[in-house]
Image (cartoon, helix red, strand yellow):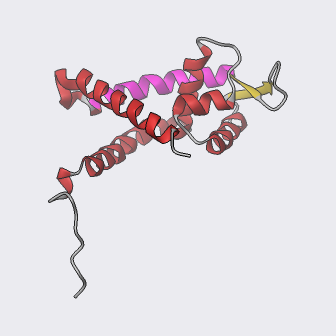
Amino acid sequence: MSKKIEFHFKKPEDSPGYLLGQLTMLWQRKLKRVLDPLDLTHTQFALLCALAWLSRDSDVVTQVDIANQSNADRMMVSKVLRTLEDKTFITRFEHPTDTRAKTIRFTATGEIILQKAIISVEAADLDFFCGLGINLKTFNSDMASLIKQNNKEISNIP
């Protein structure tokens, strides 16, 4: 018989990481159901949303900007943006001043698809998190604080 594995937590439900992982999986499955008919993955949707937010303030949005906005790996962002370009949801142009960078813009099709996706995802979010009731604002605030705290810690790792 093998030695017993030791855990800090007495049961899985005591671990915030376990609970977050379970919740994330369920939430992603729900979003997959609403994004599949639009030919979008959750990652593609997240990067399109990052582009939409960034485009509100600037006409010059780069892959690096999108990666930073979404806390995503730059290589992954590049690959996903290529896929979105193949789907004709975005276009990539030469950057006006940086020859190494590309400027990312929506196509008319991409704007329409993203708007439909946002409506579906926001409805799914409201349904998924409705059990929190008046605690939703606190939940969002706590998550934002954890993201900010851990983003700083991770950014300082060499």
Q: Quadrant of residue 27?
A: top left
- Tell me if residue 53 comes above or below residue 139 in the rendering: above
Asked whether residue 14 is in view, the answer is yes
| The residue positioned farthest toward the left in the image shown | 10
- Front in this rendered view, residue 125 or 137: 137
Question: What segment is highlighted magenta in the picture?
Answer: 107-127
- Tell me if residue 98 comes above or below residue 44 in the rendering: above
**Quarter the N terminus occupies:** bottom left
Residue 100: x and y in percent read 81, 32
Residue 111: x and y in percent read 60, 20
| The residue positioned farthest toward the top in the image shown | 57
Residue 36: x and y in percent read 49, 40
Q: Residue at x 26, y 21 (%)?
A: 137
Magenta stretch encompasses residue 121 = yes
Q: Residue at x 54, y 19 (%)?
A: 53
Q: Residue at x 17, y 51 (%)?
A: 14
Q: Residue at x 61, y 29 (%)?
A: 66
> On the picture, is 131 further left or further right than 34?
left
- Front in this rendered view, residue 89 or 17: 17
Residue 123: x and y in percent read 35, 25
